[in-house]
Image (cartoon, helix red, strand yellow):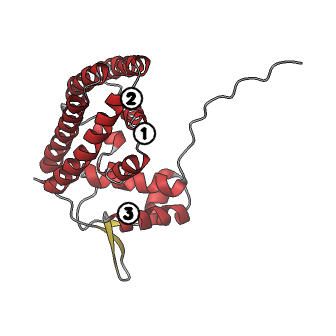
Amino acid sequence: MAAPEPRRSVRRRPRLSDEAAEHVRELIVSGGLRSGDFVRPEVVAEDLGISATPAREGMLTLLSEGFLRTEPRRGFVVTPLSSDDIRDVFVAQSLLAGELAARAARSMSSAAVDELADIQRDIESAADAEDFDGVERLNHDFHRRIYAAAGSPKLSWMIKGSLGYAPRKFFASVEGWPQASAHDHRAILDSLRAGDADGARAAMARHIRNAGDLLADSRAAVEE
């Protein structure tokens, strides 16, 4: 009897409503949509090649997150989002991420840290090649592994609430971010390898705040 083929890891496509929400959220944070602009679900649906129903569901998600508001008989409108708002979100995120990194430092094996180092080398190679999709994907994996290693699902759940302000597809193209990420990640890796919880907390918090400053500066330039 032939041995069964190993199961392949399949990257699931997000729900269509989540895809619509992510698309518009990134446009708002990057400045592609500004305060007071109207967002019509049918236009979003056409842009993404989906039906209007999941597009509208995605707008309702953004309504609950505070990115949009509704006006009677006019529809969804972008709410104000300043560079200071973005900085505030990243300050909060840095506290959560720092604690997760500290907990990961106490539990991560040398092999797990080696895998992170391999990912970091790939991030730097992708940044040098201006492969921003690759940078985004690898950076997400870098952070995901650290947060998972912390073994703190509630904290990980809480940090997800702030990730909408860090648009994954846009962030890698923010000026200075790939270089800052490479530098900051090395400090995080050094602390994880040493099992230094306080060092990992400080390095991760500093990294997240640096990222927030870069994104906020980019946002401020759009606002001018």
Please state if 11 lies on the left or on the right of 200 as rendered: right
Tell me which label, 3 or 1, sits earlier in the chain.
3
Tell me which label, 3 or 2, sits earlier in the chain.
3
In the depicted view, which residue is nearer to us: 133 or 9? 9
Q: Amino acid at mark 1?
A: Gly
Q: Secondary structure at mark 3?
A: helix
Question: Dot 1 corresponds to which residue?
Answer: 151
Q: Quadrant of residue 199?
A: top left
Please report contact status of discs 2 and 1: CB closer than 8 Å, yes or no: yes
Point out residue 203 in the picture as x, y percentages from the top left corner: 20, 31
Please state if 111 lies on the left or on the right of 87 as rendered: right
Point out residue 105 in the picture as x, y percentages from the top left corner: 32, 29
Q: Is residue 194 above or below residue 150?
A: above
The image quadrant where one finds the N terminus is top right
Q: Residue at x 27, y 19 (%)?
A: 194
In the depicted view, which residue is nearer to us: 148 or 44? 148
